[in-house]
Amino acid sequence: MSEFNRRELIRIAEEMNGMSNDETRQFITRIIDDLSNLKPSIAFVGQIKAGKSRLINGFTGQPEYLPSDVNPWTTVITDMHFGHPSGRTSGAEFHFFDNRQWQALIAEGEELRNMFPDEEDSYKREMIEEQVEAMKTRAQLRLGDSYEQLLGQHHDLEELTSDDLARYVCAGDDPTEEGEHDPGSDRGLYSDITRKAEVYFDIGHFPYPLTVTDTPGVNDPLLIREEISRQYLKESDFFVVVLSAHQALSRADLKLFRLMQALELGQIVVFINRVDELGDGAMDAAKVRADVQDGLERALGNSDIDVLMGSAQWAHYALTGDETGISHDSILAWLRAHPEQMKQYLEGVEEIKQGPGPISREAVLRFAAMIASGLPDLRRHVTQALTNGPRNEQMRMAWQHLNSFAQGELERSTARLRALAAEESPDANDADESNKLLSDLRALVAEKTEAITSDMDDVLSNLRGVMDDTVAEAVSTVVRGPDGTSPLLAKNGETEMNFTPLRERMRELVQGATQVVRQRMLSELYAIDLQSNAALRALPGWQEPVDNRMNTSAVRWFRPDMTALTRGITVELRVTWLSRLISRKSVVSRAERMIVQEFEMIGDDLIDTARGDLAERLQTVVDHYLALLAGHLEHRVGPDGTNPHTEAQRAVDQARRITDELSTALGPVPADNLQAEAAE
C-alpha cells in the first residue's frame, strides 16, 4: 500500500472522529496515531571497507552526506529520517551516552557474543571495557568541565553543516597522543560521548516515510564499533547486508548472518558491492553471487535471502559527475550482460529524450551508471518488501477497524432514516431499554474478559512449572555431561557448553502454550459475540447491522516474542574464574545452579512478555467491540430537533460517503479472507 493510502486512511479516520461517540472516538484516535507514526526502518550492516557509507549515499540520493574516506566514523549509529511524522525536514539531534548506557553496552554485547562464541570471545569483554574507558578519557580531555553535564543530554540543531557533523560523529585527533592532537580543532569534539545521530530530510525519492540507518562496521578492529552494530540489529524492520565483491561471505559475514537468523530479524537482502573492481566484470560477479548463495544455503539451511549486485562507485558518479576511477566501457559491458537493466536504461533514455532541450552525452552516461549501480533495483526491492510486509499488515488492520465502524454507522443511520419515514421512531422507553442493554453487555464482556484472563493465567502458570522442570533437566545433562564427565572439569580447560537444544525446547513450549491460549481466547470471544447478538436481536424493531461480527484480528495474528531466547548465559564466562576460588568438586553443582537460575529468568521473561502481549491484544478486541455496541445502540433514540428527517438523511449521506472513500482508499477485503477469518 502506498503513501497515498496511508494519508487517505488518516484523513478519513479524522473525519470519522467528528461523527463518533466517545468510546469509538478513543479507539479511532489510536488508529490515527498508529498510522501517523508508521515509519519503517532500513539498516545497512556489514564489514568495514565494504563501501557501506557510499552505498547509503547512493541509496538515499544524498551523495556527499556520509563521509566515505578511510574509517571516519566513531561509535555512532546514524538514523537518516526521510519524511519524518513530525514534519521535520532539516537539522539533526545528537544523543549522548550516560554511564548506565555505557555499562549496558558492555553487558548486552556479552549476551550476543555468547550466542555464537568463538576462540576470540574470551578476551573481547576486557578489550571493550578498555575501549569504553578510553572513550571516556578522550571525552573528558576534549570537553573539560562540561563533560559531566553533557552525559545523558542531547543537542538539537535546526540546520546541519558538514562541520557540525564532524564535531559529533567523526573521530578527529586523539587528545591522549602528544603531537597528534590540534587543541584548536573541534573535529570530533563530541564524538566519544555521542550515542546516536538523527538527521532529518524531506521524503526525497522514497514512496513513503522511512528511516535509513548507517551502522558502524562489523569485524572492526575497534570492537566497540562492532558491538554497537550487532546490538542495533533488533531496532530495524529491514536489513541490507553489504558484502564486498573482493571478500564476499567471509567468516565474520557468516557469523553475522547466523546471529540475524537466531534473532529472527525478518526481512534481509544481500548487496554485493564493488563489482566495478572485478577483473572480468559481469562474469566474475556472477561467480561471486553464486558462491554467496551457496554459502548462505550451507550456513543457514533453506535460505531465501535475495542477493543483488552493483557498485556504489558508479552511483556516486551518476549523482555527482565525479569520474574518478570510472570506466564507461565497463558500465556499458555490465548493462549488456544484464538484459533487465539494459531494458531500464533504454526505456529511461527514451524518456529523457522526450524532455525539453537537447540531451547531453554526459547525462546519458551518468544515467547508465545509475542503472548499472544496482541502486534503483535495491530501492525497489526494499520498498516493495516493506510495502508487502509489516507495513501492509498494519495498514490492513487499520482499514478493517475503520471500515467496521463506517459500515456500522451507515447501517445505523439508514435504519434511523427508515424508522422516521415510517413514523416509528423509538420512544423514551426504547431509549431506556437500549441503555440498560448496553450496560448489561458491558458487564457481560467484562465478566467474560476476566474469565479469559484467568484461564490464560492458568495455562501460563502450568507452562512455568513445565519450563522450570525442562530447564533443570537439560542444564543438568549439559553441565554434568551425558557420560557423567562434566566439561567444566576437562583437562584442557574447555568450558563451552551447548544449550541450543534447550533454547529450542523452550521456544516450542512457549509457542505451544500460547497457541492453546490464543485458540481458547478466540472461542470465548466468539461466544461473547453470539450472546451479544442474540440480546441485540431481542430489541423491538432491531435492524441487523452488516458489521456486527466481532473483529478478532489482533488475537488471531498473535505470535509470541522470542527475543529473550537470544540472551547469553554469563556464568559460562566466569567458570574458569570460579574454579580458582572453589574446589573442583563443587564447580559443577555451583555452575549448574547459576545456569538454571539464568535460564529460569529467560523462561519467566518469555512467559511474562507473552502474557502482556496477549492481554493487550485481548483488550484491543474488547475495546473495539464495546465501541461498536455503543454505536449500534446510541441512534435508537433520535436527537431532539425541528427536522429529524433532515438530520437523519445527512447522517446517511455522510456515512455512505465515508464507506465509499474507504473502499477507494484500500479496497474491500477479499471474500476468501473473510471466510477464513470466520472459520477461525
Image (spheres, rainbow, N blue to C red):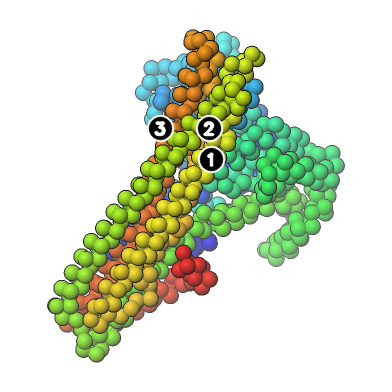
Q: Quadrant of residue 344?
A: bottom right
Q: Is residue 497 left or right of residue 103?
A: right
- Which residue lies most toward the front here? 483
Mark seen at residue 154: 3
Q: Disc 2 or disc 1, which is closer to the eye?
A: 2
The label on residue 327 is none
Amino acid on which disc 3 is placed: His
Asked which secondary structure carries label 1, the reply is helix
Which residue type carries mark 1?
Arg
Distance (Cα) linking label 2 and label 1: 10 Å
Q: Please indicate whether residue 96 sits to the left or right of residue 334 in the image.
A: left
Dot 2 and dot 1 residues touching (CB under 8 Å): yes
Residue displayed at 54% across by 37% down: 503
Which type of secondary structure does the marked residue at label 3 adopt?
strand
Instruction: Determine the residue positioned at 53% across, 40% down.
Output: 505
Residue 676 x/y as whole percent: 50, 67
Q: What's under tag 2, amino acid-wise?
A: Ala
Q: Return the x and y of residue 547 as percentages of the image width and height.
A: 38, 72
Query: Which residue corresponds to mark 1?
Result: 505
Question: First in sequence: mark 2 or mark 1?
Answer: 2
From the viewer's side, name the closer residue of 341 and 403.
403
Distance from Cα at disc 3 to Cα at disc 2: 46 Å
Which residue has dot 2 on it? 474
Nearer the camera: disc 3 or disc 1: 1
Q: Are marks 3 and 1 in contact (CB under 8 Å)?
A: no
| Residue beneath the point at 62% across and 44% down | 240
- Front residue of 628/473: it is 473
**Along the line of sight, the residue nearer the viewer: 276 or 346:** 276
Say above or below: 34 vs 21. above
The answer to which of marks 3 and 2 sits earlier in the sequence is: 3
Residue at 75% across / 38% down in the picture?
Answer: 245
Q: Is residue 675 visible?
A: yes
